[in-house]
Amino acid sequence: MFKPISRRTMLKGVGAALALPWLEAMAPAIGPARLTNPPLRTAFFFVPNGVWPENFTPKGTSEEYDITPLLKPLEPHKNEFLIVENLWNEKTAGRNGHWPKVPAFLSGGYVVRTSGQDIDTGGTSCDQVLAREIGHKTSLPSLELGVDEPYSGVDNVGGGFARVYGCHIAWRDPNTPVPKEIIPQLAFDRLFRNSPSKPLISGLDPRREAIVNSVMNDRVSVLDLVNEHASSVKRKVSLNDRTKIDEYMESVRDIERRIESTSKPQPRWVNDQRFDLNRPAPGIPKSHQEHMRLMLDILVLAFWTDTTRVATFMLGNAQSNRHFSFLEGVESGFHSISHHEQKEDKLAAYQKIVGWHIGEFAYVVERMKALQETPGTTLLDNSMLLYGSTIREGNSHEHENLPLLLAGRGAGTIKSGRRIIAPKQTPLCNLYLSMMDRMGVTLAHFGDSTGRLEGLS
């Protein structure tokens, strides 16, 4: 008979330690800390350059609808998602077609036009609000993934907005983006990091020793001790340096949270089925589709292992001009094609790219639908997956009635398989309030919300 082992078992070598993934032998070690019901997860998927509405939005106004050409990849899963119509972010109206709309996607904030010295998105993204409130329950408060490297500089053609705006939908606060991971191996490894089971007070980098001692002994955040000095330093340095300082301090905060969580472990959800995913090779795959699928699988694995319950995924940066020449009939960049000027050949290519992205979302839906968590429920049933763009249509940059799909049943709180036609110009933040309610985070107001989105259940 095999001997049970601790989930915190590490593979150790000289100068390195690698955490093991979930093994059957770890089950006895989890015992009392195991949740009896699956948790609810939520993920936000951003896709650039809009859609072709004529072949995305169903005709008529009935809840029941026929699958449109662009939604064909999702046809086998029609009963698993909602089409949500007439939502928008009002503060993006009349602004540049791409750059200020992306950081407003999950916050509804007014994005300040800047070349980079005073970035301000006008709000914290809803995923980070969730991470702040429930992130202590999992190893990772949230997981940010994507497939495109961040941009730098200023988009002078697009009205003088810092291009960093277009690279992030997750914002820790109005001035601080949360970096997304685009390298599969690094994203995979993040899922299996473990904090020490007891304080390490020697042999560490001196800064880490200070963090551990502060948290474990004094129960005082080291950041509280240095915050005033850090604020003073940040006023004297460049935007890039401010961002680096913010990222460093957040990494310190993450260590503190993880140590605190170890001393007071939260009940975890453990799935008994297998979900096999080998550790990816280093670097980024040459094939864009392989890269996309690897990153999507890692997101599913993160939810399946209860490593996090909050995630964002960018299927491309703002104004992405990635070439999709692997699709038949597509011979130029995505953004260029999205300005189709009603020309048949460009419209056809545009829809192939849009349809391909919807197919990748369908892949996630299918993967999560196939993973049973309890008798009668799946990982998808216990999730909410929002897919959408910050513009309705690529040629016009229309900002009303954003193309939005909401998959999953929200642990039985969402009636899927239909369309919801909200009143025109309903704040997208109304939907976020409703989603946060279901995650156990109840706010009176978020962004430009005017109430909860009706009709989800």
Image: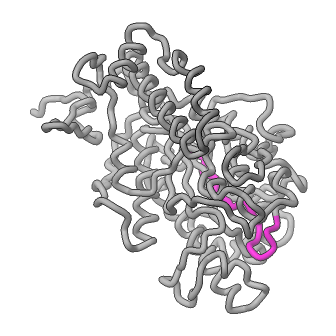
| Outermost right residue | 424
Question: Image height check: is 44 above or below 271?
Answer: below
Question: Image height check: is 279 above or below 34?
Answer: below
**In the shown orientation, is residue 320 left or right of residue 376?**
right
Quarter assignment of residue 165: bottom right
The residue at the point 40 percent across, 20 percent down is 211
> Can see residue 186?
yes
Q: Which residues are magenta?
A: 382-398
Q: Position of residue 67 (x, y in %)?
A: 69, 72
Q: Nearer the viewer, residue 246 or 94?
A: 246
Q: Position of residue 248 (x, y in %)?
A: 47, 35
| Outermost top residue | 218
Quarter assignment of residue 446: top right
**In the shown orientation, is residue 145 left or right of residue 411?**
left
The residue at the point 55 percent across, 70 percent down is 359
Q: Nearer the viewer, residue 384 or 317?
A: 317
